[in-house]
Image: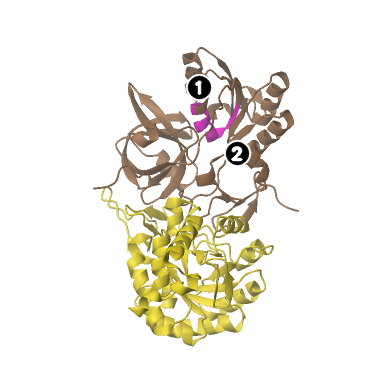
Chain colours: A brown, B yellow
């Protein structure tokens, strides 16, 4: 008899439904009680047979009164593209959830969330949890262009369901929707006019590095969800190391104190062979 | 009490991080040392960088064992040499993998001057063609690789053997005849996991190496036979999960032992918990030095 309580053991799940989010992003919904018990920021390892196994941020999707596990995937490499084209009724393998999750400090009164692209997957979940906990929250949703804005309707619905105890602001690289420019620039302008007690971020690393700098400048704690190339997800292979931390086990969420110690954050990452590569070429 | 000398390597305790686990960055080596390891073996380093296989590369089994086919991913000896150039803290053993003596010659020369305490030659990776077990099953090749490595370093050289088509004792004999200072036994064992749902072997490489408690009794037998025949320094490896397993390896003949898979289940605190367990055991038994355990079962 297979031990269904050990979430490290691969389990097969049937896809219930696929939702088109944007022209290149879809959400895959499946029955899985462990995913339903997950927290914002945790991830699953998703096996697409014969193609890949990928770390994916885990979400929860309600269909009627029933809750399902969900992953949101952008069509990009072979693995994500194969997952993107999966249909309802097909099966995939999953293990996890893995990693820590965003914390909501007691008595937190307001928070600013800064997310870009698929980094918004855990952040929109977090947005709901914060509003549910009566934390006045502003959510910055960044994307390249208008038709790539992810989860807009979902975020608007969360806001409506929680008596609009928060705000949503949009930024696009090309200015086709909301603020023209980076999420970090938008965050800076918001921080200059309003005091926040917490910054949460997930998205491209250089964007998160920008958020960390804002946190230092305005003396606001930051939590960032980091990404590194991952193989095992259980803290044994070392592929996902950043300095002496393992993103899969010690993260993926790191707070300001830890981020300050991570000299590789926003500077370098390791490729599949373990060699250091740099975000900005070194002179 | 736990400190000992093994083939010229002075260790504060006999608990060593096994090759293949965590070992590519100096920062992680230092963390593992701070967590209580007596020494650290790097991932196997090759002449050129290797990306390894695509995922899935690891399957978790029911019984706290794994099958992996990571594919020897490593940054190559030049980048690795750069990585460890500041090491003056961690007793580091570099694992080397290659397909012919010239690979070992060039890598040993470069790394010999780094802050390392020894080498371990991986002759037994069970899932990469032309590297590892395919080499390790050829006694003549083993001989020339070990001779070449030894002639380019004064540091101790261990040879890691596996359960392949050639007997562990025969390969070890070839390695020792060629000048190896000790044997690491054993590597993972060729294994598979297949999905009964979609009929696919789960690992992208299909076949991988089995590690953890599943292989411990086989590893104990190999260490026992090696000690009985050669009385040379042995690193026991294969399924050490707790101090009881560690003691069993030592009384079978291991001078020290390596820990890997157990980290996935108990985290890095496993090093200290094994240390503490051995100390209490020795106090109970009235032993002064951990060396008294080595090969003790052979009296019976």
Which image quarter: residue A179? top right
Report if residue B126 is visible in the image.
no
Q: Is residue B15 left or right of residue B86?
A: left
Ranked by sequence position, the earlier of labels 1 and 2 is 1
Residue indicated by mark 1: A155
Q: Chain of mark 1?
A: A
Q: Nearer the viewer, residue A46 or A22?
A: A46
Q: Residue B140 at x, y = what percent?
A: 45, 85
Q: Eyeballing the image, is A27 above or below B295? A: above
Residue B189 percent location from the top left of the image: 36, 67
Mainly helix, strand or loop, the magenta region?
helix
Q: Give the camera-side residue of B290 and A8.
A: B290
Mark 2, secondary structure of its residue: loop
Is there any visible trace of residue B118 in the rendered image? yes
**Which residue position is annotated with label 2?**
A204
Which chain hosts label 2? A
Q: Which residues are magenta?
A: A113-125
């Amino acid at each position: 008899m297979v031990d269904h309580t050990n979430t490290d053991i691969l389990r097969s799940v049937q896809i219930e439904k696929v939702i088109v989010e944007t022209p290149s992003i879809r959400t895959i919904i499946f029955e899985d009680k462990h995913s339903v018990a997950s927290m914002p920021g945790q991830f699953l390892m998703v096996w697409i047979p014969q193609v890949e196994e990928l770390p994916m941020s885990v979400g929860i999707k309600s269909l009627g009164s029933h809750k399902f596990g969900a992953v949101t995937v952008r069509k990009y490499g072979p693995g994500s593209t194969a997952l993107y084209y999966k249909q309802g009724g097909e099966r995939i393998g999953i293990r996890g959830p893995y990693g820590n999750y965003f914390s909501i400090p007691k008595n937190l009164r307001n928070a600013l969330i800064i997310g870009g692209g698929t980094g918004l997957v855990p952040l929109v979940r977090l947005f709901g949890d914060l509003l549910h906990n009566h934390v006045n929250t502003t959510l910055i949703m960044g994307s390249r262009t208008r038709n790539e804005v992810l989860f807009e309707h979902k975020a608007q619905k969360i806001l409506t369901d929680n008596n609009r105890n928060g705000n949503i602001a949009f930024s696009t690289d090309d200015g086709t929707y909301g603020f023209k420019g980076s999420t970090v620039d938008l965050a800076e302008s918001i921080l200059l006019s309003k005091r926040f007690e917490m910054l949460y971020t997930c998205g491209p690393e250089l964007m998160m590095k920008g958020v960390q700098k804002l946190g230092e400048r305005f003396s606001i704690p930051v939590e960032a969800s980091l990404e590194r190339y991952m193989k095992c997800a259980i803290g044994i292979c070392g592929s996902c190391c950043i300095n002496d931390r393992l993103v899969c086990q010690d993260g993926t969420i790191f707070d300001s104190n830890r981020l300050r110690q991570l000299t590789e954050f926003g500077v370098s990452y390791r490729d599949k062979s373990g060699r250091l590569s740099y975000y900005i070429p070194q002179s | 009490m736990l400190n000992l000398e093994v083939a010229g390597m002075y260790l504060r305790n006999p608990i060593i991080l096994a090759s293949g686990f965590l070992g590519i960055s100096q920062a992680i080596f230092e963390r593992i040392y701070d967590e209580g390891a007596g020494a650290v073996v790097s991932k196997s380093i090759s002449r050129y960088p290797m990306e390894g296989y695509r995922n899935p590369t690891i399957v978790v089994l029911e019984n706290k064992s794994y099958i992996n086919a990571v594919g020897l991913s490593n940054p190559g000896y030049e980048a690795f040499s750069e990585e460890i150039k500041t090491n003056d803290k961690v007793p580091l053993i570099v694992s080397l993998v290659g397909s012919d003596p010239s690979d070992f010659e060039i890598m040993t020369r470069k790394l010999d001057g780094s802050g390392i305490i020894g080498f371990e030659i991986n002759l037994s990776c069970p899932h990469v063609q032309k590297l590892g077990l395919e080499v390790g099953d050829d006694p003549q090749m083993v001989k020339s690789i070990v001779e070449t490595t030894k002639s380019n370093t004064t540091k101790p050289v261990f040879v890691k053997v596996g359960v392949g088509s050639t007997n562990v004792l025969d390969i070890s004999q070839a390695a020792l005849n060629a000048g190896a200072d000790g044997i690491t036994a054993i590597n993972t064992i060729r294994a598979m996991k297949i999905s009964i749902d979609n009929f696919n072997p789960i690992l992208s490489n299909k076949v991988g190496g089995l590690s953890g408690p599943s292989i411990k009794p086989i590893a104990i037998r190999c260490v026992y036979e090696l000690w009985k025949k050669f009385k040379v320094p042995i690193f026991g490896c294969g399924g050490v999960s707790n101090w009881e397993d560690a003691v069993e390896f030592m009384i079978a003949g291991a001078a020290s032992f390596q820990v890997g898979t157990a980290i996935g289940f108990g985290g890095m605190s496993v090093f200290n918990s094994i240390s503490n367990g051995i100390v209490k055991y020795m106090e109970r038994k009235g032993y002064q030095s951990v060396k008294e355990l080595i090969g003790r079962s052979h009296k019976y």
